[in-house]
């Protein structure tokens, strides 16, 4: 099953700096939810170990993270693919675009995620909410990592069959 | 590869010691979610700490404010408790609607709350009644307890001991359940006090249980099903899956709210 998500963040940091952070392994490691290991294989390829924890489920995914379609300092595509053993597989990616605005940079992303195997069968009712939560988590942490608090975060409505941004939980 | 240690402490301190010494150990309450997850190999804890033999974790007590229910109390015991039926009948009614008889005989209040499944029933009652979740070292009000999809204010290794439910003027729970899983597609718990009306919704929100504040506000001035008629719940934050779209769930929430109110208005 596939999901699509979009969102945008205004950052009070120059575009060059945001671009540098997007290519910084240490920053990416801190922002990928559940990332325990992230190792550079080449300039555009990384090896990753990510622990996905949703409710009672805890699965360790090992796989690769690839940076492609690089157009510095405007946009790139970050994608990941991992095997979680009996849990199944997960893959996803996001096109990230940076636009200069007064006093900083607007980061927009269009992400999609796909899972298969047991996780997909059992977790069907939870996948949309979880994927959204992980994508939001990444970009929120990234915004914090590049320049303190974001100047204005506005996670836009999610596309596809997915509902939208996280509801106000009690 | 899939073996794990099984511990069954008789004191809370023993359980805490095991959990704090091993971050990969997991608590076992009624096991209605955890055991199926283990069977599917979707979690592989190093140890299970069975809480069922710890003294003082189960039982139902009437208090000056309402009723206090031990975390390890089974749903079936809440459903047929004369105390709960007298003080907060809607809570007994909710417990009797959870899952099936097997789930109600094994599942526990604390287990349900610690898991915070977005379609579980108990979170709606706890949030609407503004109950207090007591753990091994502190008390957490419901408003601060639920923090999103499977997320709670609980720290790693923190054990729920009991939940204090305050008595309210009127309360009711209306649930539209999935006929196969019996999870809530939309479950609405309405609680009315002299000061306010709280409407908590489970089964529908993408991030789990939430308060429908708009409905609470209109019901505070006019406690009737008709008062809800004018409202429309925004579907953009609701769950969408093969059982129903977000728009469908928004409508279900409204209808369940009206049913709950109609049963006690």
Image (cartoon, grey):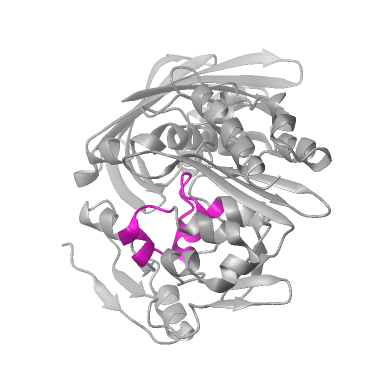
A164 sits left or right of A43 in the view: right
Q: Is residue A126 above or below residue B100?
A: above
Q: Quadrant of residue B262?
A: top right
Q: Which residues are magenta?
A: B98-123
Q: Residue at x 42, y 74 (%)?
A: B19
Which residue lies at the image location 66% right of the left edge and 69% below the top edge? B139
Please name the residue shown 56% across and 26% down the image: B251
Q: Nearer the viewer, residue B259 or B161?
A: B259
x, y percent for residue B130: 68, 57
Q: Position of residue A81 (x, y in %)?
A: 29, 31
- Look at 58% across and 73% down and name the residue there: B83
Q: Split into 4 quadrants, where in the image is the C terminus of chain B? A: top right
Q: Visible in this render: residue A81?
A: no
Quarter of the figure that contains the N terminus of chain B: bottom left
Indicate whether A97 appears above or below B91: above
Q: Position of residue A103 (x, y in %)?
A: 76, 21
Q: Is residue B63 visible?
A: yes
Nearer to the camera, A113 or A10: A113
């Amino acid at each position: 099953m596939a999901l699509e998500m979009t969102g945008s963040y205004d950052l009070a940091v120059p575009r060059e700096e945001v671009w540098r952070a997007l290519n910084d392994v240490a920053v990416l490691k801190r922002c990928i939810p559940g990332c325990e290991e992230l190792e550079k294989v080449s300039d555009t390829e990384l090896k990753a170990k990510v622990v996905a924890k949703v409710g009672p489920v805890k699965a360790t995914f090992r796989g690769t993270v690839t940076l492609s379609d690089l157009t510095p300092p405007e946009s790139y595509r970050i994608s990941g693919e991992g095997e979680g053993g009996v849990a199944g597989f997960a893959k996803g990616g996001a096109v990230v675009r940076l636009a200069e605005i007064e006093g900083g940079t607007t980061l927009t992303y269009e992400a999609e995620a796909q899972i298969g195997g047991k996780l997909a069968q059992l977790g069907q009712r939870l996948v949309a909410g979880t994927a959204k939560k992980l994508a939001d988590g990444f970009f929120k942490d990234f915004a914090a990592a590049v320049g303190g608090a974001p100047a204005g975060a506005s996670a836009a409505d999610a596309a596809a069959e997915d509902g939208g941004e996280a509801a106000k939980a009690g | 590869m899939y073996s794990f240690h099984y511990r069954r402490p008789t004191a809370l301190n023993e359980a805490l010691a095991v959990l704090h010494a091993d971050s990969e150990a997991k608590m076992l309450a009624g096991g209605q979610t955890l055991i199926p997850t283990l069977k599917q190999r979707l979690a592989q804890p190093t140890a299970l700490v069975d809480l069922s033999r710890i003294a003082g974790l189960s039982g139902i007590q009437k208090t000056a404010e309402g009723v206090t229910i031990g975390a390890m109390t089974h749903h079936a015991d809440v459903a047929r408790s004369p105390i709960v039926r007298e003080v907060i009948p809607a809570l007994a009614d909710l417990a009797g609607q959870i899952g099936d008889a097997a789930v109600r005989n094994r599942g526990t209040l604390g287990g349900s709350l610690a898991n915070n499944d977005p379609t579980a029933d108990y979170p709606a009652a706890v949030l609407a009644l503004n109950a207090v979740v007591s753990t091994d070292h502190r008390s957490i009000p419901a408003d601060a307890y639920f923090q999103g999809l499977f997320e709670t204010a609980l720290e790693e290794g923190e054990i729920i001991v009991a939940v204090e439910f305050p008595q309210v003027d009127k309360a009711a729970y209306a649930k539209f359940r999935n006929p196969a899983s019996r999870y809530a597609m939309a479950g609405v718990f309405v609680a009315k006090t002299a000061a306010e009306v709280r409407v908590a919704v489970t089964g529908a929100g993408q991030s789990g249980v939430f308060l429908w504040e708009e409905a609470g506000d209109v019901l505070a001035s006019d406690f009737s099903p008709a008062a809800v008629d004018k409202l429309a719940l925004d579907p953009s934050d609701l769950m969408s899956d093969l059982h129903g779209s977000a728009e469908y769930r928004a409508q279900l929430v409204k209808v369940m709210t009206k049913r709950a109110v109609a049963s006690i208005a």
